[in-house]
Image (cartoon, grey):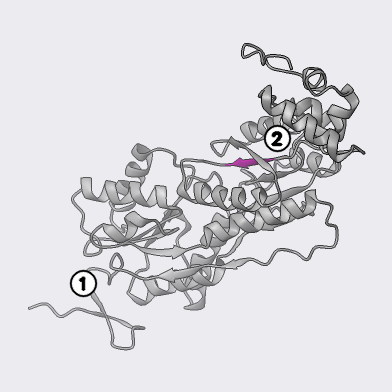
Amino acid sequence: MAKPDQHRDHTVSDVAREAGVSKAQAARALGAYGAVSDAVRSRVLAAAARLNYRPNLPARALNTGRSQSVGVVVGDIENPYFSLATRGISDAVERSGLGLVLANTGERVAAEQRAVEMLMDQRVDGLIVAPASTTETAHLQAVVDAGRPLVLLDRAVPQLAVDAAVADIAPATREAADRLLSLGHRRIGYITTADGDDPDPGSPAPLPSPVAARVAGVAAAFATRGLTWDRSLLRSGLRGEARIGAAVADLLTGPDPATALIASDSLIGLAVVGALQEQGRRIPEDVSVLMYDDQPWARLVRPPITVVSQPTYDIGYAAGARLAALVDGAVQTAPLDPLPARLVERGSIGPVPGIREDRAGSRPEARVRS
């Protein structure tokens, strides 16, 4: 037998020569396609192991039409939501023998377009994408038109006829906003990194669908009480602690400041809490704080942070399992059901300063001061 050469990548031809079979037989055995006897397969695999052979995946994809890998495109891998969702995706697709190629976009449509094109060029078997925009989606439609399986993560796009793994966020969002209203809050600020300022997907500047649903839930809670939420308290497109800190200071100053702040995810929540500490403001005595997504730190700070918790891992797992099924040829699949979110109340929300809640928890009254 030939001595393995440690200084170059071995080819199918090398494996065939080592095993004493034809190149076509070696290719079928290594690629797990076509007819090959058990004896030949065993000889080829043993030869491949001796040579430390690694397959040329792009070449295999050209030959078989399958790369045994899927692409995952997320908005911000630093965001714990996407990290945990990606873990769920990975666990699901690995059960089907698929690998995972990850791309990060920084919530930029142009970066998303490049990532999708790159993954398509690599002939991944399918894609999971958290779209940065609900309107600039031609590159995603191109994936569908090419017949490549596509599943959306966290964000639905109405004009795309594909599955979306998302949370049923609206009920918990309304409950959270209503809880703040019951504590006397009427000036409620909302802070998000997402671009856009309108929850209507047909507007000139729509927010991504999950953020739009949260903002709409705040407005709906106000409307249920015959009130109107002041949309000027929405701060969007904020990236970086400095910009978030400036937005917090802006919302809490002036003649009619916000008395409660809602952070659209845990990274924003951490920046909001830090900004309040730097500004010497107490939670919840000076300002109430609520955020989306539950992270361990939210239970460890004092006071612990009230959150709208999403089943993030399960959302990722659902996306991965559905994509794996589509890659395997499934055609009759029911739409993915949204997974429920829930309000977890802790110590970071309280009555507006000078207001107390009545015993029924529904009518704020002026606090009597001596």
Mark 2 lies on a secondary structure that is helix
Alpha carbon separation for disc pair 1 and 2: 53 Å
* Residue under the point 73% across and 56% down: 163
Dividing the picture into quadrants, the one containing residue 112 is top right
Foreground mark, 1 or 2, reads 2
Identify the image quadrant of the N terminus. top right
Compare marks 1 and 2 and give the one earlier in the sequence.
2
| Farthest-out residue, front | 1
Which span is picked out in magenta? 70-74
* Residue under the point 55% across and 63% down: 216
Q: Is residue 144 above or below residue 224?
A: above
Secondary structure mostly seen in the magenta stretch = strand
Asked whether residue 296 appears in the rendered view, the answer is yes
Percent x, y of residue 147: 85, 43
Percent x, y of residue 159: 77, 52
- Dot 2 amino acid type: Val
Query: Dots 1 and 2: beta carbons under 8 Å?
Result: no
Is residue 73 in the magenta section?
A: yes
The circle on residue 116 is 2
Foreground residue among 158 and 190 = 158
Percent x, y of residue 123: 77, 33
* Residue under the point 29% across and 53% down: 252
- Packing grade of label 1 (10 A; few <14, some 14-19, many >=20) is few
Asked whether residue 199 appears in the rendered view, the answer is no
Is residue 84 in the magenta section?
A: no
Which residue does the numbered mark 1 point to in the structure image?
354
